[in-house]
Image (spheres, rainbow, N blue to C red):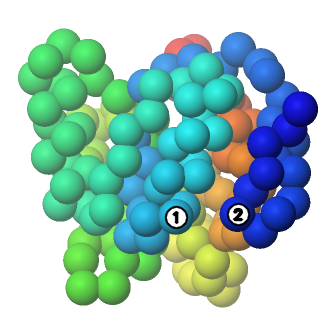
Amino acid sequence: MPEEAQSGTPLELEATAGGGKILLMDDEDAIREMAAAALSMFGYQPEVACDGEEMLQKYRQAQESGAPFDAVVMDLTVPGGMGGKEAVRKLLELDPRALAIASSGYSEDTVMANYRDYGFCGIVSKPYSLQELDDTLREILARGLN
């Protein structure tokens, strides 16, 4: 039986065998919680961060522990905090092979239009479907392994 989202609409999640440790950075609690729950259902091991500073701290700790993240999904706009545009530069200084996905509700944002120029390897536009997030992660992780 499908679970109900807060809006009362059923969440239709395919039970597929995703995999990998994913760090999701977003300033909105509801998005972090919903996406983390969905990523778990898809077979990923999600962790969350509310801004770029927390994301970088968690990424560094995971690297040092020998259990690095396979990909990071970053919200571009974090009011009062470090957003994805600045955070991806710092992430790539820390780990030039990091796989970063930009996320934004502002489709006219130049970063979304030219994401590779900023160091991202994919995008998900908000509001994104949970299936779209899974599909994007699968594609990025498959390319990253080649």
How far apart marks 2 and 1 lie (CA) works out to: 10 Å
Q: Name the residue tied to disc 2.
A: 6
Which amino acid, by three-letter code, is at mark 1?
Answer: Ala
**Residue 67 appears in the rendering:** yes
Answer left or right for 40 relative to 96.
right
Quarter of the image holding residue 118? bottom left
**Which residue occupies 13% across, 18% down?**
65
Q: Name the residue tied to disc 1.
A: 30
First in sequence: mark 2 vs mark 1 = 2
Answer left or right for 37 relative to 67.
right
Position in image of residue 30 (x %, y %): 52, 64
Report if the CB atoms under discs 2 and 1 are less than 8 Å apart.
Answer: yes
User: Callout 2: 10 Å neighbours few (<14), some, many (20+)?
Assistant: few
Element type at mark 2 = loop
Q: Quick check: 78 above or below 13?
A: below
Image quadrant occupied by the N terminus: top right
Q: Quick check: 38 above or below 19?
A: below
**Which residue occupies 50% across, 52% down?**
33
Position in image of residue 139 (x %, y %): 69, 32
Q: Nearer the viewer, residue 126 or 14?
A: 14
**Which residue occupies 70% across, 63% down?**
6
**Which residue occupies 37% across, 38% down?**
47
Position in image of residue 123 (x %, y %): 62, 56
Answer left or right for 28 relative to 123.
left
Quarter of the image holding residue 85? bottom left
**Residue 141 appears in the rendering:** no
Position in image of residue 20 (x %, y %): 49, 21
Q: Quick check: 41 above or below 24?
A: above
